[in-house]
Every structure is written in C-alpha cells, then in structure tokens.
Image: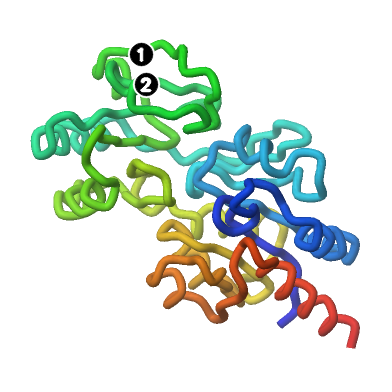
Amino acid sequence: MTLRLIATDVDGTLITSERVISPRTLAAFEAAHAAGIILLPISGRQPFYINDAVGGTVLEGPVVGANGAVGMDLRTDEIYFEDLLPVDEQTRLVTQMQRRIPGTRAVSVRDAGKTFVPERGYVGLMDPGDHGKSDLALPEYDLDEVLGTPSLKLILRHPEIHEDVLLAAALELDVPGCHVTTSGAPFIEVSAEGVTKESGLQQMCARFGVRPEEVLAFGDNRNDVEMLRWSGWGVAVANALPETLAAADEVTASHDEDGLAIVIERFLQQREV
C-alpha cells in the first residue's frame, strides 16, 4: 500500500502502561513524519488531554478527539469540525438509563472538550486524572443543565456497576440518534449517531486528500473497531480486546513492547525498496 497517513489511538496503543511514548515508538513516528506521512492521534480523550500525551513531539498537530466528534490542530487551536449529540437524544438516553439503573450519573463535554458539566454526584465517582482532571474540586450541576445543551460527548457512570453492564443496557435500549461505546475507562461514552473514530478519520482524510487505502491505523479497544475496518491496513496491539483483534488486518506486539514501532519501521523500509 501507499502510506500517506498514520492514525493511532492513544491509551493502550500509542502510550505504554507507564503513560509515555517509548523511545523506539517515538523514533518511528519521527521517521514517518520526516518521510512526509501525516500523523493523526485519534482518541476518546478530549483534544487538550491528547496533548498531555503528545505535546512537544511530532504527533502534536492534527488530532481527532471525543471518539471522532471533534477534529482540530493542537498547534494552532483551529477546530476543523464538531459533531454534537442533540439535546432530545441525550435526554432520552439518560432518562431511560437512570430509570433502568438508578444511581447512574451523567457528564456533558462541550466546546471542543474544554467544558466539563457533571451532574450532581458525579465528581465523587472520579479518581484524580479521570477525564484529564487532576483537581477534583469541580462544580456540579442539576441534570436539566447538564442535558440542556448539545454535547460533544456524553458520559454515563455508576459507583458500583461495571461499564460493560452499562454498555449492554444502553445498547439494549437502542435510543435513536445515539452511538454508545467504551474505551477502557470506567464509564460509557455517547456520541451522536454515526459519530465514531471512523467518521472523524474520514473527515480528516477528506481534508488532507487521503484515500482509505492510504491509511495505516492502530488501536486496542472497542471504540477503535470501526476505524480499523475502514483503514487500508488496520493493526491491533496484542493487548487489544478480542473484538478489536478480530477487526484488524494484523496483530502486532503490545503497547509495552513497541508494537507500533515494529509495524511503522516495516512500512518505512518497504517505501525505500
């Protein structure tokens, strides 16, 4: 394949268990950048939190955040697109989820990820670092205020019930207009219908004039499946979920074993032949 863009998930894929980019992986991305290949971190994180992982490296530039709902350039703060979850749809989902699983709490993420609007009772469920928030002295809001404005991403969490149980309930409810997934964090994440990492990647490829068959993509979790299937070559790291492994064209070593570097180095060597 002719490689023009590398898309990579962040947590569990690009960064190690120590939450850093390994030297070998960073060197591989630097070599790809020097070869003129576009680099695109694409994450469930909000853009500012993606920057915590890639700032100061060649990966600091175009990114897709919130599971495909926002595209922007970290260097210039230019927002390329935002795809929002409408008020009626998010209200319907939260109402039904709280009726089915009492104690479920919601957060609305807005303004390209800069605004965080948690329902009363949510902040106490967080650990330092959740959602990129080290300081947990956050204001909370009545549910009407949380749901009264369209969300870039809606988050649902419960103090005792695992995110997989919440996901199964939300999928069973099948509320029109909502796309529900998980990313390895202890909550479920809701976007507008049709908004996934695939849709965000498609919009960025259209912007840069890149075809699907020119894209190499890496991922590990449920929210990476659509992106891996759409890309010309989708690669799962060895630590990926079973459904992500099944969606990939190739399985590489884990995020702690330079899995991305192994594949990128091979592609760059093939370009030189």
Image-quadrant location for residue 251? bottom right
Three-letter residue code for mark 2 = Val
Mark 2 touches mark 1? (CB < 8 Å): yes
For label 2, the crowd category at 10 Å Cα-Cα, with few meaning under 14, some 14 to 19 and many 20 or more, is some
Distance CA(mark 2)–CA(mark 1): 7 Å
Residue at image position (82%, 84%) is 270
Q: Quadrant of the C terminus?
A: bottom right
Question: Disc 2 marks which residue?
Answer: 123
Colour basis: rainbow
Residue 86: horizontal and vertical position, in percent? 33, 34
Residue 192: horizontal and vertical position, in percent? 36, 44
Residue 246: horizontal and vertical position, in percent? 42, 77
Question: Disc 1 marks which residue?
Answer: 140
Q: In this rendering, would 166 be left or right of 1?
A: left
Q: Quadrant of the N terminus?
A: bottom right
Q: Secondary structure at mark 2?
A: helix
For label 1, the crowd category at 10 Å Cα-Cα, with few meaning under 14, some 14 to 19 and many 20 or more, is some
